[in-house]
Image: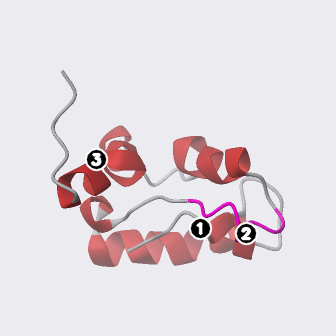
Amino acid sequence: MKVGNAPDRSHQPFPFEDVHAFLRGIHDAFGSRRMLWEADITQLTKNTYAECLRLWQEGLPFLTAEDRDWTLGRAAAEVLNWPEPA
């Protein structure tokens, strides 16, 4: 499940609280191991790339450090069969 552009769907500034329930629902249904963060810069119309990333780094209180790790890259690395960093 691609989730990176959620902040651009928000009608509020960071931390984009009006999309938190939606993202929590995705997290509860699929888990962080199936959530892939991305931010298609061509689709960002209201927020910056940095703001979109910041939401996942510090703006969603229900995510654990492990959830963040999976969502921000580990899940994509596993899907793409990328080697673990040394």
- Circle number at residue 8: 2
Within-10-Å neighbours for mark 3: few <14, some 14–19, many 20+: many
Mark 2: secondary structure: helix
Mark 3: secondary structure: helix
Q: Position of residue 14 (x, y in %)?
A: 77, 53
Name the amino acid type tagged 2: Asp
Circle nearer the N terminus (3, 2): 2
Distance between the alpha carbons at the discs numbered 1 and 3 = 22 Å
**How many labels sit on residues?**
3
- According to the picture, the residue beneath numbered tag 3 turns out to be 74
> From the viewer's perspective, is residue 58 above or below residue 56?
above
> From the viewer's perspective, is residue 13 above or below residue 24?
above
Tag 1 and tag 2, C-beta contact below 8 Å: no
As drawn, the residue found furthest toward the top would be 86
Q: Position of residue 46 (x, y in %)?
A: 84, 65
- According to the picture, the residue beneath numbered tag 1 turns out to be 20
Distance between the alpha carbons at the discs numbered 1 and 2 = 12 Å
Q: Which residues are magenta?
A: 39-46
Q: Is residue 59 visible?
A: no
Q: Is residue 59 magenta?
A: no
Our reading of the magenta stretch's main secondary structure is: loop
